[in-house]
Image (spheres, helix red, strand yellow):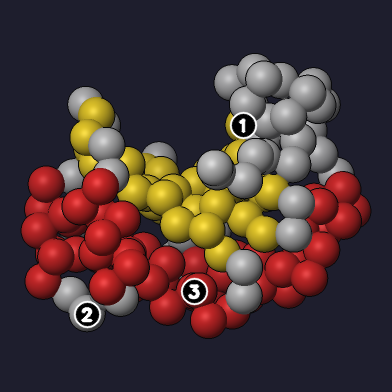
Amino acid sequence: METPNAFIGKTTLPTFEEVSAALGSTAGVWKQLLDWLAEQGVADLEWKSVSAKYGWGLRMKLKKRTIVYLLPCDGCFRVSFALGDRAVAAARQSDLSKGALKLLDEAPRYVEGTWMRLMVHASEDLADVRQLALIKLAN
């Protein structure tokens, strides 16, 4: 079962304090990822909620292009990528972990691309996230 978004039912944008409280021990890992993405030029932040039923997510953009979606959960966070065909091919040729490659193989394919989702519980989980972000940026 997938860990739910921490802000399901919330109709207003979560504050920094609310996000930090929900993330708990992974708040520092969240910040590490945001800082690293900013170093790659992915610094445009856009909080979105399609409805209170789904909660809130943070889109990280380079200009108008969404590179990664971050969804805060209780004590962890989900990272999602919509990967086009070239990015999927590059990911399969990369040195992603076996677990990440399995997720890629199982990922649903939609019009906007193959929707890859990873859970982050600790800083060690960021290696695959960083690699996928670089692949998305290059493709």
Work out whether 57 lies above or below 135.
above
Residue at the location (38% across, 72% down)? 128
Q: Quadrant of the C terminus?
A: bottom left
Q: Is residue 91 above or below residue 7?
A: below
Rendered location of residue 72, percent (x, y): 67, 49
Q: Are marks 2 and 1 in contact (CB under 8 Å)?
A: no
Residue under numbered circle 3: 126
Q: Secondary structure at mark 1?
A: strand
* Residue under pointer 1: 48
Where, by quadrant of the figure, is residue 114 drawn? top left
Label 1 with label 3: CB-CB less than 8 Å = no
- Total label count? 3
Numbered circle sitting on residue 95: 2
Hey, what amino acid is under mark 1? Lys
Name which quarter of the figure residue 7 lies in: top right
Instruction: Specify few, some or many for label 2: CA neighbours under 10 Å numbering under 14, 14-19, or 20 or more.
Output: few
- Name the kind of residue labelled 3 in the image: Leu
What residue appears at the point 62 percent right and 46 percent down from the top-left corner? 3
Along the polypeptide, which appears first: circle 1 or circle 3? 1
- Chain-order first, disc 2 or disc 1: 1
How far apart in space, not on screen, are marks 2 and 1 (Cα)? Answer: 32 Å
Q: CA distance from mark 1 to mark 3?
A: 23 Å
Can residue 87 be seen in this snapshot? yes
Local crowd size for mark 3, using a 10 Å CA cut-off: few (<14), some (14–19), many (≥20): some
The residue lying at 75 percent from left, 66 percent from top is 27
Compared across the picture, whether 11 is left or right of 73 comes to right
Q: Amino acid at mark 2?
A: Asp
Few, some or many C-alpha atoms within 10 Å of disc 1 (few <14, some 14-19, many ≥20)?
few
Q: Nearer the viewer, mark 2 or mark 1?
A: 2
Q: Position of residue 67 (x, y in %)?
A: 39, 51
Q: CA distance from mark 3 to mark 2?
A: 14 Å
Mark 3: which secondary structure?
helix
